[in-house]
Image: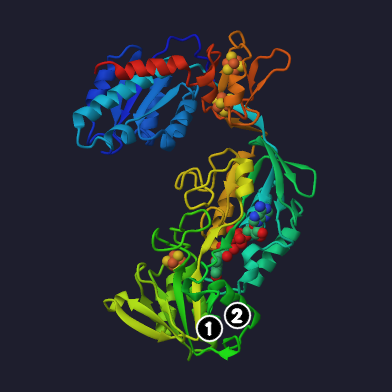
Amino acid sequence: MTDHKTETPKIGVYICHCGGNISDTIDVKRVAATLAEYPNVEISREYPFMCSDAGQKMVIEDIQAGRNNRVVIAACSPMLHELTFRKTLERADLNPYLYEHVNIREQASWVHKADHEGATDKAIRLARAGVEKILRQDELESIQVDATKHVLVIGGGPAGMKAALDSAGRGLRVTLVEKSDRLGGHLHDLDTVYPSGLKASKILGRLLNKIKATPLITVALNTTVTGWEGFVGNFSATLSDQSVLKAGAVILSTGYDHVIPADGEYEYGKDPRVTTLPQLIEHMKSHAGQPLVWHGKAIKSMAFIHCVGSRQKEGVHAPQADGKVNDYCSRVCCTAALHTINAIQEIQPELNIYDCYRDIRTYGRGHEEIYTKASKNGVVFLRFNEDAPPEIKSASVVVKDVLTWNQEVEVPADLVVLVTGIKQGAVDELVSMMKLPVSADRFLQEAHPKLRPVEVANNGFYLAGNCQAPMDLVESAAAAGAASSKIAALLSKDYIPLDPYVARVDADKCTGCEACLTECSYTGAIFQNPTTRKAEVNAALCKGCGACVAVCEPRALDLAGWSIDQMEAMVDAMAAEV
Ligand SMILES: Cc1cc2nc3c(=O)[nH]c(=O)nc-3n(C[C@H](O)[C@H](O)[C@H](O)COP(=O)(O)OP(=O)(O)OC[C@H]3O[C@@H](n4cnc5c(N)ncnc54)[C@H](O)[C@@H]3O)c2cc1C
Ligand code: SF4
Ligand code: SF4
Ligand code: SF4
């Protein structure tokens, strides 16, 4: 790559219209014209879609023609396209860090839709700040860390098994850690599965055979991760029954737990006629092909009640142990309930089945057919409102049916099945050990639901299956496949490039006061050199959060790419008159 260190900075500014997302509110021509007059700006252009091939080509041609050697693009969020334009600069043989992405969409046009003048002024200020920042930017180089070509998969349910197979299929060594004494997770509990109708045991058998036949996979049963350190490419996991395992990346596939109804909810635990869907499935599995008999009584009429322990509302439902309600939809339970109803009707078509639901969410491919089949087979659907849940009586269920204008309908029920949902499994220890982000619903959180759906924000961590959100087998397998293909790309070379935005210490200024060591939340990111007593940074562990910079009185610390000089110049540029 060409060395531009000695060149006079020549900045190219590009203002994107983002279709009309930006230009409908912001006067992009005025922004470009104003920036053209700004010191050190050589060219300033506006264009309908900077991220398009044509937009990127324009940037490359300007750089290659020597018109500019630093770039500011004022467009959408850097979350979306910062990487796109870094690659554009690489293609133009320019250091990719000599580029600043300024967000004039989320930060200007979208939030000031009614104030065109104000939004335009703000876009000018933001773009000028970008210019001042990139003017002071060093030619940073990405940090390179070794890539250990070994994947640790935690959780040996269907998602973890598929993730292990897919990773091994890409030539990576895998250790699959399972805390119980067998692989398979909740697949063991299921009978036939929707949408295929295959026996769960058959699917499990196939997965187990494949794993056995894959020498790259080591299975560690009755094992948990008890210690954790390191960074992407170089993790060290202490396993409960072994010595330390080295891994380049980790897939979390710890699955789910069933929601247990609150004590007395729908008479659960008090009335023996009341059970849960997982318990019914287990019963049907162990009494395959037989008519339903519950506590010695042949069942003639039964009712299902949906959304038990899911889609809860504060003030209506009892909170969970942590004081919160489960306000999310568990997604798999509508289809699982209807699939079970169809299975019952195949054996006992004469059985009366009442399905009491709030909404039917049979969202996946082939799921609607399961709903249609149940309807055609004579299942009676009764829709209730969340504020008026069905009432359990001694031999019946009473529902205020929304479909008949809240008419109270009483249906006979020898058996009541609570369609319980899914909740996060016991992952607290892993969460605190690995500092994993958790969403409000307690599931592990991905970095971005659309742009990075199976990656955790922490480098090197990936998600597969129900530890992230309720998913069926097809979705769990897709997530496992996506996570392993991401890891294959990550570990494809002998090293992993990391962003260079980390803390730097000026040893001449450091007094060894240790204030930064106390402030930093990331183990090992900053430490004291035992000989010189000066602070030093482990670039692979530093997250670039800047907390240490703020407490360093002699200003010995700075963040590469976000230096105090850069920040001060940006603030001045933003404060200056337009
Ligand atoms: C009632 C019901 C019916 C369903 N029916 C269907 C159906 O018919 N079709 C369908 O496609 N899907 C169905 N599902 C969904 C299906 O069960 C899941 O998609 C499937 O089990 C995949 O889950 P998983 O691998 O993410 O998690 P799990 O099956 O929960 O497996 C997680 C594994 O991780 C292990 N583990 C947990 N924590 C740790 C740890 N710290 N260390 C090591 N190991 C750990 C667990 O022991 C377990 O073996 C149903 C779900 C429910 C609730
Ligand atoms: S999938 Fe159906 S039963 Fe389950 S929580 Fe969602 S709406 Fe309720
Ligand atoms: S806070 Fe500053 S001066 Fe004190 S040890 Fe850290 S880098 Fe050195
Ligand atoms: S920037 Fe943040 S993570 Fe890095 S050393 Fe400083 S406090 Fe620690």
* Residues tagged 1 and 2 counted as in contact (Cβ below 8 A): yes
Q: Residue drawn at (24%, 30%), measured in percent from left and top?
A: 119
In this rendering, would 319 be left or right of 507? Answer: left
Residue underneath mark 2: 284
* Residue 15: percent from left, percent from top: 31, 28
The answer to which of 306 and 161 lies nearer the viewer is 306
Separation of marks 1 and 2 at Cα, in angstroms: 9 Å
Which secondary structure, mark 2? helix
Q: Quadrant of the N terminus?
A: top right
* Residue 59: percent from left, percent from top: 39, 26
Q: Residue drawn at (57%, 26%), measured in percent from left and top?
A: 519
Which class describes the residues within 10 Å of circle 2: few (<14), some (14-19), or many (20+)? Answer: many
Three-letter code, disc 2: Met
Can residue 48 be seen by looking at this rendering?
yes
**Looking at the rendered structure, which numbered label has been put on residue 344?**
1
Which secondary structure, mark 1? helix
Which class describes the residues within 10 Å of circle 1: few (<14), some (14-19), or many (20+)? Answer: some
Can residue 67 be seen by looking at this rendering?
no
> Where is 453 relative to 475, above or below?
above
